[in-house]
Amino acid sequence: MSTMPLPVGRVSNQLQSAMSLGTLQSNQLSLLKVQQQIATGQRLSLPSDDPAATVGIMGLNQQIAANTQYNNNLTFASGFLGMADSTLSNISTLVTQAQSIANSMVGSTATADQRAAQGQIVNSLLQQLQDLANTQYRGQAVFGGQSGSQNPFIAADGGYKYVGTQQGQGILTASGAVIPYTVNGSQVFGGQSAEVAGSQNLTPSLTATTRLVDLTGASLKGISSGSIGITIGSPPTSTLNVDLSRAANVGDVVNMVNAALAAAGSDATLSTNGGSFVLQGDSTQAITIGDVGGGGSMASDLGLTGTTAAGAVTTGTPLQPKITATTTIASLRNGAGIDPTGFIITNGSQNATITLDGVTTVGDLLNKINGSGTNVTAEINAAGNGINLFNPVSGCSMTIGENGGSTADDLGIRSFTTSVRLSDLNLGVGVSTSSLPGLSGSIVVTRTDGSQFSVKTDGITTPDQLIAAINNAGGGTVTAALNSTGNGITLSDTSGGTGNLTVTAGSDFISNGSDLGIFQVGTDGTLTGGDITFSTDDFRITRRDGTSFTVNLAGASTIQDVLDRINNADGNNGANAVTASLNPTGNGIELSDASTGSGSLSVTSLNASQAAEQLGILKSSTTGVIAGDDVNPVQPQGLFSTLSQLRDALLSNDTAGIQRAAALLETDGQRVITANGVIGAREQDLQSRQNNLTSEQTQLQSLLSLLQDTDMTSAITQYQLLTGVYQAALQVTANNQSLSLLDFLQ
């Protein structure tokens, strides 16, 4: 940026002027660039000023812009999580309030009216919980996953249904990773669908339309595509390589193999039966089927490997077809099909009877269930061998019962079956049997001849056991048997004495609440006892003819155990027996009385046991049939369900239900605390990222400043230098342009 040297030789005036002007323009341009740098603070005016620096500036600006957007996203997510944190704190307070109500209402001092009043308060807590669960932040549901502005929890048939998504929403980091910030409401409030998992293996039989891709295969690895080798005769008269790579279904395999056999002159045929292929061997020669060399396994996968002797029939390994929407109902259960009578779905206030009229495929059945208006959803299980039904509505109980046939049982979807565990009944309350201890010590029998013998009662819990103990100790002269009413014991003495047969308690006898009904003085050699009740008995069943028997459920663990205990109870036999089974319509236990009389078939509790009530059979009937209640409803577990159960238990004065709800609130409260911890961890993570991003932005701005901003000290110094140079150039030019006559003459 120096002035051009002025000519000293003889040059024309025009050339001299041009050179001076060029020097001035160059100096002006340099001065202007420095002035612009000082005025704008920018080192570059055009990309061409410094192409390398321009590329760096563009990259830095892009990164800074991306970080700015990223920071905005982090700020939004932080606010979102802050709202979630605050809401969860309010929910924790609500849970604590509900726990306080539950704990205060369990005690015996609380009255039914007091519990009902608290039930109304819990109902208001449910409404508050729904509002909190539907909290939004800047138009987005906090607990809805990816549901956006849609409320994730809606009222449905007296319950609460989660309609948000299981998937969360997140923000992208600069590296492409995802930071989640939304919350899945079902993880906070529960509400995940409770299911009736199909208990029956519905694996269908093979049909011509069964797709090969839907077969589990003999090797449990599916069906590979390729060829199978067939050898006819021994030694072979023909060796075939049947290409089945284009076979799409079972019918294709049968047709291709049979065509190849026929073309080779064999009368062997391939067909299906149940879940397997069946080869009817050639009438005159053996048939051997195997895999083709080179790693093929299709014959093994199809269960066809092996040799079939002439005239023999070989059934292949079962291929376990998977259930699909197109699977026919008739093919289920290996071709046994399903009873078409139908089943009854009840969910909260909604119910529907699903019959198989017009239902030909599994897809038809699923559509009928899902469109029943009960909010129940049905799907094929992951293994492809059964059907599961789900109840997504918290606070509503789902039951699946029969419609007079066996459809639900055939499908494996009945919610009340003989295999249901007693501990799972009543939403987990279970069945509480008598807690009293059994007999101990001895009883003393005095014969008519005055002689006595003792009978040990330790461990005796049934009339038959007591009868056996008396007969074993009586020496053959005193025998015991159930009386004609079946509810007491009659003793007979053949010793031939003149006294009366008598039974008294021994000095070590402890009844523990049992009433044997035989502590009395008989008439001559006969003693007829009254009603016998053991302290371990749970309930008494009285027939219409007035006879009765007791049932002890100690050690019972399933509904089948209960049925067996009733059906095999002492005194329940003969033509007048009471039969216990599952209700043919709906669910629950049915008691059927074969006796006749003007009385009622009834069930009464003994020894403070709640078993009869909790089994749903604490009833009476003049018809001789007691239809028990369904006490195994299926309900999603979570805060909405627990508060609904607590409300209902308070309103119905159900102390057992209140206790169970109180226990469940502990679990629900812990779930909320865990969710709050996850939210807090995410907030800390976001804050850390924002701090790191701020430091990174500072560094990027510093680098950008080095490339883009003007160095004012250097620019001002340069400006001063250029100003002096420009002034000098002007002075030189002025001197050169001052022409005299002498200059002209030269």
Image (cartoon, rainbow, N blue to C red):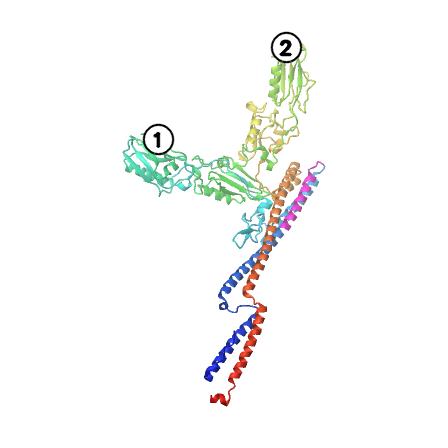
264 to the left or right of 75:
left
Q: How many marks?
A: 2
297 to the left or right of 626:
left
Q: Residue at x 34, y 35 (%)?
A: 289
Q: Name the element at disc 1.
A: strand
Circle on res. 158: none
Q: Name the element at disc 2.
A: loop
Outermost residue, front direction? 9
In the rendered image, is residue 519 in sight? Answer: yes
Q: Residues within 10 Å of mark 1 (few under 14, many from 20)?
A: some
- Residue closer to the observer: 326 or 59: 59
Depicted 620 relative to depicted 369: above or below? above
Residue 500, located in which quarter of the rendered image? top right
Q: Residues within 10 Å of mark 2 (few under 14, many from 20)?
A: some
At which x and y percent is residue 679?
60, 49
Depicted 239 relative to depicted 502: above or below? below
- Residue closer to the observer: 6 or 661: 6
Q: How far, Cα to Cα, is label 2 from label 1?
A: 73 Å
Residue 224, located in which quarter of the rendered image? top left
Q: Which residues are magenta?
A: 85-108
For label 2, the residue is: 495
Depicted 173 relative to depicted 32: above or below? above
Q: Residue at x 28, y 36 (%)?
A: 264
Circle on res. 313: 1
Q: Amino acid at mark 2?
A: Ser
For the stretch drawn in magenta, what is the main secondary structure? Answer: helix
Q: Amino acid at mark 1?
A: Val
Q: Earlier along the polypeptide chain: callout 2 or callout 1?
A: 1
In the rendered image, is residue 39 in sight? Answer: no
Residue 623, located in which quarter of the rendered image? top right
